[in-house]
Amino acid sequence: MNTPTNRFLRACQRLPVDHTPVWFMRQAGRSLPEFRAIRQRHSFFEVANTPELCVEVTLQPVRRLGVDAAILFSDIMAPLVAVGVDVTLVEGVGPTLARPLRTRDDLAALRPLDPDSDMLPVCETLGMLRAELAASDTALIGFVGAPFTLAGYLVEGKPSRDFIQTKRMMFDAPDLWDDLMRRLTEIVVSFARGQIAAGAQAIQVFDSWIGALGPREYARYVQPHMRRLFDGLRAPGLPEVPRIHFGTGTAALLELMAEAGGEVIGLDWRVNLDEAWARLGGPERVAIQGNLDPVTLDASWETIQREAEIILRQANGQPGHIFNLGHGVLPSADPDNLARLVRFVHDFRVE
Amino acid sequence: MNTPTNRFLRACQRLPVDHTPVWFMRQAGRSLPEFRAIRQRHSFFEVANTPELCVEVTLQPVRRLGVDAAILFSDIMAPLVAVGVDVTLVEGVGPTLARPLRTRDDLAALRPLDPDSDMLPVCETLGMLRAELAASDTALIGFVGAPFTLAGYLVEGKPSRDFIQTKRMMFDAPDLWDDLMRRLTEIVVSFARGQIAAGAQAIQVFDSWIGALGPREYARYVQPHMRRLFDGLRAPGLPEVPRIHFGTGTAALLELMAEAGGEVIGLDWRVNLDEAWARLGGPERVAIQGNLDPVTLDASWETIQREAEIILRQANGQPGHIFNLGHGVLPSADPDNLARLVRFVHDFRVE
């Protein structure tokens, strides 16, 4: 990797920084009035697939909050939408499929993603974003969902708490499961490579619902595919960008996730950052991202500041900490608190 | 504590047993056709508050499955219903309140539980159950929800994923939060003592949603109350029964939970039983209950047997393991698989 000047990219490589970089998962979204104004006129996937709109909403939090990185406005399901899976984002529910994937015939109908034709708006968006961001010192992060989380939506047909159908396939039809995970991994790798080739300077892999699994299940049914995914993000001719590996409910999975890959491990708020980082070998081994409870942003500024300070003290100014939430910004978060938090993180110094 | 003959009660005390005891959270419930038949004619709380019906559904899984313990058929919200909180169990949603608790005035309206008048049906049920079970060698477990999980329902007014209102109270109104937790702890202690006095031979404290918190939040806002709760289950004149402390999503909380109290720690499936037990000091320090993923019961018998065997091998026949699921039986579980699993656990021997 090149030696970057942007402090987010430097932290990904565990290089010294002038102050802790910060961005927020789902920083582009319903907490911002300017985003809600656009969503009143356009559906989610209209925004995601119209480069002018997608550039605009991706940059909104950069302008308003002063974060160190922009992340492509996208959804976990985007690569599946790109290969023609019939997904609707139902308000208050989440991604909902016209037809869940349950059988080998259903799987056969899932086609590969062709980065040259299936993701033109995404590539155009990323090119425009790089041009817009060239004058600033803001990094650009690409966005992909991980195969287990995608499989959960595909097999259940809607958001799930228990993942009954998904786990039943895992347990009782392991060959079908492995084929599904292999296909999804290929799709995700193509989608991620396309983003890197188009200008993404880092890539975050969202395995948002992986915490539904125990470590034994993860090791057997998911980890081999995640290894191939992370390996697939390195290829001749492809810029070598930092890979961020994120999930929630991962307190018992962190070592297995780090083994699978990623220069940066994203933590949710259910672990102490210092303990989790130490378990993974500390700043000598891996960078760490996180991990303020997103609900904190619904509390008073005093609470936000106190909790953020605890996390910054746990990180102790060591190279390789990127401040973020433990999951996405909630729609109820106050953007003024977000902006103030960015300034607080930037101004913070360990005494 | 007395030295019991029942193998579940012996395992709670980490005494040697002839074979591993087993019962299932929510073993009385919608997976059993004989339960569904009763629920067609009676609401949930009608069943819970009518001793004849409650005895019947509590004993159904004992007869059909051959488990080593019966658990009082109840709901986490039962003590709140007993003090007059207006709770409805909405099908497919969960406990829903006519009016969420948000202010100090709301809290003032929450009255203490009087074990002599507010839980007569529960006490009568437990007395009848002890008489019914006297001839068998089946233990009887009492059932209470923990204050955080109760507070979550009370403050949100319905089941929640993010617990925004609850955490906001925790963060921004810590005095109100502490008062609420103190009041709930008193209610839960009264409800549990009443059950012990009426014949419960062990008591399980369900902190089902505690995994929404990180360890820092748990230590500050919950653990002091849980200590007082567990201390409150010991009192002059009250039989000294084993206390089971259970939650889900607790991979980063286990040490803090064990510190708060319990002779038995209940695990969900998101941790390896051997690793979790070792973290807590192993069989020299504490008994352990768990931890088969409930979704496994929707898979084939081969899968169920394989996964159960892994857990039994992790426990390695050491005194103090009670086999259970990692959370409640799902309505879709096949009762024949449950019965077969009980026999498998009983027949299993570590070579």
Image: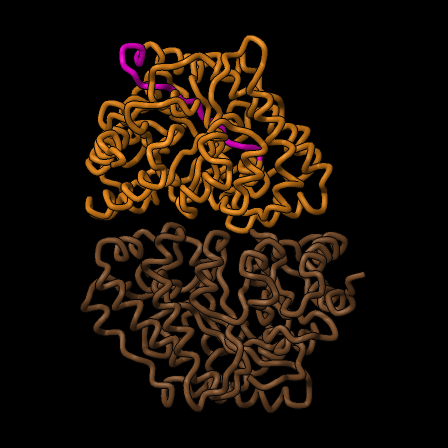
Chain colours: A orange, B brown
Q: Is residue B37 left or right of residue A160?
A: right
Q: What is the total number of numbered labels drawn onto the structure image?
A: 0
Q: Is residue B338 left or right of residue A262?
A: right
For the C terminus of chain A, which image quadrant?
top left
Q: Which residues lie in the magenta part?
A: A132-147
In depth, the one of B301 and A203 nearer the eye is: A203
Q: Residue A327: where, in percent of width, then height?
A: 39, 40
In depth, the one of A39 and A272 nearer the eye is: A272
In depth, the one of A166 and A274 nearer the eye is: A274
Q: Residue A211: where, in percent of width, then height?
A: 52, 45
Q: Is residue B72 visible to the viewer in this orientation of the structure?
A: no
Q: Residue at x 47, y 67 (%)?
A: B206
In depth, the one of A227 and A174 nearer the eye is: A227
Q: Residue B122: where, in percent of width, then height?
A: 46, 84
User: Vertically, is B299 above or below A197?
Assistant: below
B73 falls in the magenta region: no
Q: Quadrant of residue A236?
A: top right
A135 falls in the magenta region: yes
Q: Residue at x 60, y 91 (%)?
A: B131
Q: Is residue A199 visible to the viewer in this orientation of the structure?
A: yes
Q: Is residue B126 left or right of residue A15?
A: right
